[in-house]
Image: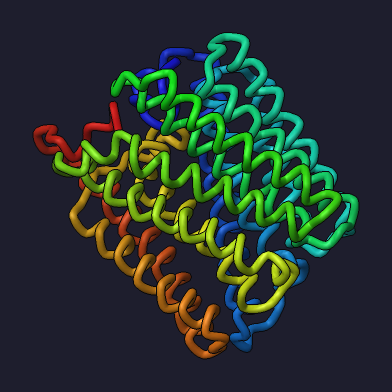
Amino acid sequence: MKNILALPDTDIKRSGGILSIKRRWRVPAMIGIAIILTAALWTALIRLGWDLPSVAGATAVQHGALMVSGFLGTLISLERAVALKRKWTYIAPAASAIGALLILAGLPALLGHSLIVVASFGLAAIFATIYRRHSSMDTAVMAIGSILWLAGNVLWWANLPIAQAVPWWAGFLVLTIAGERLELARVLRLTPLTKRLFAGSIVVFLAGLALSLFFFDAGVRVAGAGLFLLAVWLIRYDIARHTIRKSGLTRFIAACLLPGYVWMAGAGIVWIVYAPYFLGGLYYDAMLHMIFLGFVFSMIFGHAPIILPSVLGVPVVYRPAFYFHLILLHASLAVRVIGDLLLDPALRQWGGLLNVCAVLLFIGVTAWSTRSVRNPRKPDAATAGQGL
């Protein structure tokens, strides 16, 4: 199975029927995703304590759901739908986007929550189809990740404290990314023992999630241990250790991945130490954002030049300026986490504001980098998306 994140745009365009759907819905999809991301960032600032008005359903309590199940859930589902080239697969991204937009519109929460649960069922069905075509450990891990998204959304739909759904949402993103990285690590010819170590870290993490349903603090600690073990495995065996010596986009992606793994290892430690605080407060803020910003958004920064052309048909050319938002993300997150762990609300607030600025800078630089495609130059290493 080809890595979906590394698929060239030409591979996506071979099916005329799917391409026509893609063209028809490209602009609405981009607008919907942009609205959801903007709302998620707005609610992030409200959650940090900045004096901003709430807009309909865009309240601080909805921040995590909008970012994970609205923005990231839609983007990942759309990516898989485009890669699988089946019309029914577009139900998942459509349901998650519409569900998030209904929440933002201030309509009864049950409507939006229910649609997002439908979306997670759809993504699980997509991965079941992918696994039937390519039954391997990496596709199994990604399929399990989609089930974790479904489980987290069901807990959220059942109106349980949102903190109980968060570890499952984190697992969805972590396993999706880890499965992709395992697939790319095949070129390194991993030994059976190395693969068992990878599987073992996943089992520990999943055991922690299951335990959290009955003994929440203990479950968070076990899941944290799984995060730490998986991060150590990725630091040691991911192909990024080799591609960091390359140039252009290949090197930039590795520069996004490696610090992301360090943040995930740190998050695992913080989950173990501060598990009793997982229901709220500054320690909770650190436990979440080391994963969702330090790990997940670092991955997004790295893979956006590959994902956007293949999924939304928006050409992106690598620019050295990409390092600006990457550095700002990690530097501001360090300030925020230090503020969290030292119980300093001011550091947390300013670090969080700069986190939002890093995401906005990422959007701006990426949009600017699309203009150069209109006047293409000779291809270079910066535009190579394969084998990353």
Q: How is the image coloured?
A: rainbow
Judge whether 124 appears above or below 48 on screen: above
Along the viewing direction, whichever of 265 and 10 lies nearer the viewer? 265
Judge whether 87 appears above or below 219 on screen: above
Q: Could you tell me residue 149's position as x and y percent?
A: 70, 41
**At x 60% / y 53%, what residue is drawn?**
224
* Residue at far left of view: 378
**At x 38% / y 40%, what residue is drawn?**
314
Q: Could you tell me residue 244's position as x and y percent?
A: 21, 43
Is residue 305 toward the left or the right of residue 263 in the image?
A: left
**At x 47% / y 60%, what residue is drawn?**
266
* Residue at far front of view: 193
Q: Could you tell me residue 52's position as x and y percent?
A: 63, 84
**At x 66% / y 50%, what residue is drawn?**
222
Judge whether 192 appears above or below 251 on screen: above
Along the viewing direction, whichever of 171 and 215 lies nearer the viewer? 215
Is residue 251 toward the left or the right of residue 231 in the image?
A: left
Task: Please say whether residue 103 is visible from this viewpoint.
Answer: no
Is residue 49 toward the left or the right of residue 218 in the image?
A: left
Please identify the quadrant where the N terminus is shown.
top left
Q: Which of the 4 quarters of the picture holds residue 345?
A: bottom right
